[in-house]
Amino acid sequence: MQKLTNRSVAVNRSPMTLAERAYLPALAKGLRITLGHIFKKKVTISYPEQKRPFSPVFRGLHILNRDEEGRENCTACGLCALACPAEAITMEAAERKPGEEHLYREEKYAAKYEINMLRCIFCGFCEEACPKDAIYLTETVMPSNYNRQSFIYKKEDLLIPHPQKQEGK
Amino acid sequence: MSEVQNFKVTIDNITVEVAPGTTILNAARAIGGEVAPPAMCYYSKLKDSGGKCRTCLVEVSKGSEKDPRPMPKLVASCRTTVMDGMEVKNITSEKVLDARKGIVEMLLINHPLDCPVCDQAGECDLQNLSYEHGSEKTRYEFKRRTFEKEDIGPYIQLHMTRCIMCFRCVYTADQLTDKREHGILERGDHAQISTLLGKSLDHDFIGNVIDVCPVGALTDKTFRFKNRVWFAKPVDAHRDCPTCKGKVRLWMRGEEVFRVTARKDQWGEVEDFICNDCRFHKKETKDWVIEGPSVVDRRSVIAQGHYQGKVGMVKEQPRLIDQVIGKAPKLLMDIHSISDVNRPDVDLSQIEGPAHSDDFEHNK
């Protein structure tokens, strides 16, 4: 049979020599490699204290944006859900009532908005599809948890804090 | 020889034989495909429609066999009848494509481009047209014409801002109902569709103005903001209706009927006009005999859910996991117990108008 590469080596099954049977030279060889690595530059970092720099295109946890007056940008147009390859986003729309103008920017808004983070693959298509600057992927790493229920992010979990209420604090 | 000789017309180098008196647009539709010019105002089921929007402009490079001079200007194909030996250029003419681009820009001048809010998005003729022929930017710098949204009747919402003045709804109301109550008020740039003195529209067939509207100016209030059309599953269904033929298209989500419309053909025109009772009051699955999934154009956004198929086709039932392992699977999490969306106690399809904040509140 023709070989695919020339790197393959046949297994040597000849009886061991005296040096090999003595075992200690092989042990010393192994220890030399171990000791050599102690003085090399470490590839790991001690994570919570040290952090690696993020790539400028890193995509983490989603947020839902508000405008300067604190009104929700999302109009539940469904383009993020349409673009989502993992089908993680669902929503239900409602009409803004008179008197709710300070809450929602347009006459239609997302009454329910949900991202299933167990499904999400953080591709950022939702951010790209959004015509209203409403959804963004931040640099926050998605927090882990012990139960699956906490991975269903509702609208309240995703919305950024109200800009004016925050100043008042 | 009393037989009428058919006319030979060549549109985009494809020859077709049509009866005399046929318009260029209908001759092109007989060929089909991309040769057919887009039409925003012409509606084959409505008499006298057409000639308003100018999107169907074509170049006539040879008038007829007897008079081979080309027509001096681009002509509206929905209003120009064919002549024997006529040669028409539609997509092969750069002049036409350029003019169409200008027309789209003109139609979009006062259009608010609120597609994220509009219920027509996804099945909007103007959206498709501007996507195919329009430019991405507008050169218009002035204030756009705006109107307050208007309730005409209990089921129809009028967004005059989105209107492109195609007059289709006026012809529908005129030709389908015996007493027309809505029309165009004022003239020129001030022209607007409205009812006289805020009168509400009330007729068995008036709901069809929603279907004929090429944009989102007239929308179904019972469907308002409830779902995006591309997330709904189009299904052909029928029922025994005393007033209309009862052949409709249901837009469903799961077992809920969100919207009822007439069936539309490949040119976006309704096959049969349906009555208000079918459209607005029969929002339950048990009212209908379901024939099967509707045929949806592959390039349409509505096809994204892969619901389309042949009518009458029986889908193979998927083999569920409990049949494979012989017992019910143990779920680590049932999404329906946590999710707020699609709650069984909030029946969106049964709410009369659009949902409001209090529709979601009481069941927290």
Image: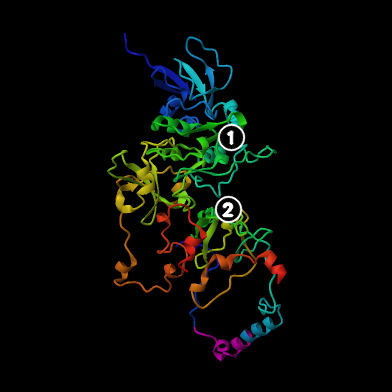
- For mark 1, give the secondary structure: helix
- For mark 2, give the secondary structure: helix
Of B91 and B54, the residue lying toward us:
B54
The quadrant the N terminus of chain A occupies is bottom left
Q: Can see residue B178?
A: yes
Against B46, is B160 above or below? Answer: below
Residue A113 circle label: none
- Find out whether the residues at labels 1 and 2 contact each other: C-beta distance under 8 Å: no
Residue at the spot of label 2: A129
Give the image location of residue A156, x and y in percent.
57, 67
Residue at the spot of label 1: B107
Q: Which residues are magenta?
A: A15-29
Where is residue B1, by image quadrant? top left
Which amino acid lies under the numbered mark 2 shown in the image of this protein?
Ala
- In the image, taking residue A127 as reference, residue B294 lies left or right, namely left
- In the image, taking residue B166 as reference, residue B19 lies left or right, namely left
Q: Is residue A16 magenta?
A: yes
Q: What residue is at 58 percent from the left and 30 percent from the top?
A: B186
CA–CA distance in space, label 1 to label 2: 25 Å
Q: What residue is at 46 percent from the left and 49 percent from the top?
A: B229
